[in-house]
Image (cartoon, grey):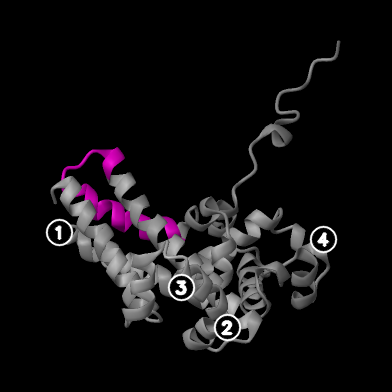
Amino acid sequence: MAVAKQGEGEESEAEAPSLWERMDRPAPVPRASLTLERIAAAAVELADEEGGAAVTMRRLATKLGVTPMAAYRHVSGKDDLWALMIDRVSRDLAVPEDPEDWREVLRSYALQTRELMLAHPWMAAMPTTVVLLTPSRLAVAERGLSALDAHDLDADSVMAALRAVTSFVHGSAQTEIALRDYQERNGWTGGDETRQALAPQMRYLMSTGRYPVFERYAGTATRKDDRAWEFTFGLDCVLDGIGQRLGI
């Protein structure tokens, strides 16, 4: 039986470098015309213009003026591409670093993340793990975790509190984006037109008498279309709950 020589097959068995490790490596000289930065920028531009579903390797290659195989030499597939896109748009998140004011750190994180998702609505369709597991997103999360960790909390409580805020942000932003898309598809320019279009359904449902509190809201609420106020109010409720629960 033949015995493999020392070192034979080591390259095939070694773990391939991750996307982020490859980004941190120095660019070859002369610089390659196609880079991960160019791919990320083009993918974000395409998604912003036509939606996340438009971002395919073939469309991206056409936009970059290369063959699909050339793009595949840099990214292994859709997950890599999504991660690059998320990381690129998240670089400008300016969450403060103040371990003494955990509430302001998490509040800033939440408000900026909502604005980011509204500016890039394709983010709402991304798997949560992709949205969070990039260098830029981890840097922001690190600030939130550090602000909570400064209060001598156990590691599980620190992470659970941050995830509670993150879940609220993503859920609220996804709902807001979905409503905006629904209105656009139907040609409704705002809340009044939407309510007018849905009025027959609403009148019937309210006539059953089963939803008295909702009926009172429909008749007396004054902030029905103020999504920013609604988000901020809900966020403050979450932060109040974290502070009360953790005693901070």
Label 3 is placed on what type of residue?
A: Leu
Please, what secondary structure does the residue beneath circle 4 have? Answer: helix
Density class for disc 2 (Cα within 10 Å; few <14, some 14-19, many ≥20) is: few
Pick whichever, 207 or 131, lies toward us: 207
> Is residue 120 among what the camera can see?
no
Density class for disc 3 (Cα within 10 Å; few <14, some 14-19, many ≥20) is: some
- Magenta span includes 58: no
**Which residue in the structure is indicated by mark 2?**
197
Residue at 51 percent across and 58 percent down: it is 131
> Eyeballing the image, is 17 above or below 46?
above
Pick whichever, 23 or 120, lies toward us: 120
Q: Nearer the viewer, mark 2 or mark 3?
A: 2
Q: Nearer the viewer, mark 2 or mark 4?
A: 2
Q: Nearer the viewer, mark 4 or mark 1?
A: 1
Answer with mark 1 or mark 3, whichever residue precedes in sequence: 1
Image quadrant in which you'd find residue 232: bottom left
**Which residue in the structure is indicated by mark 4?**
69
The Cα atoms of the two marked residues, 2 and 4, are separated by 48 Å
Residue bounds of the magenta highlight: 136-157
Q: Can you name the residue that lies furthest to the front here?
A: 208
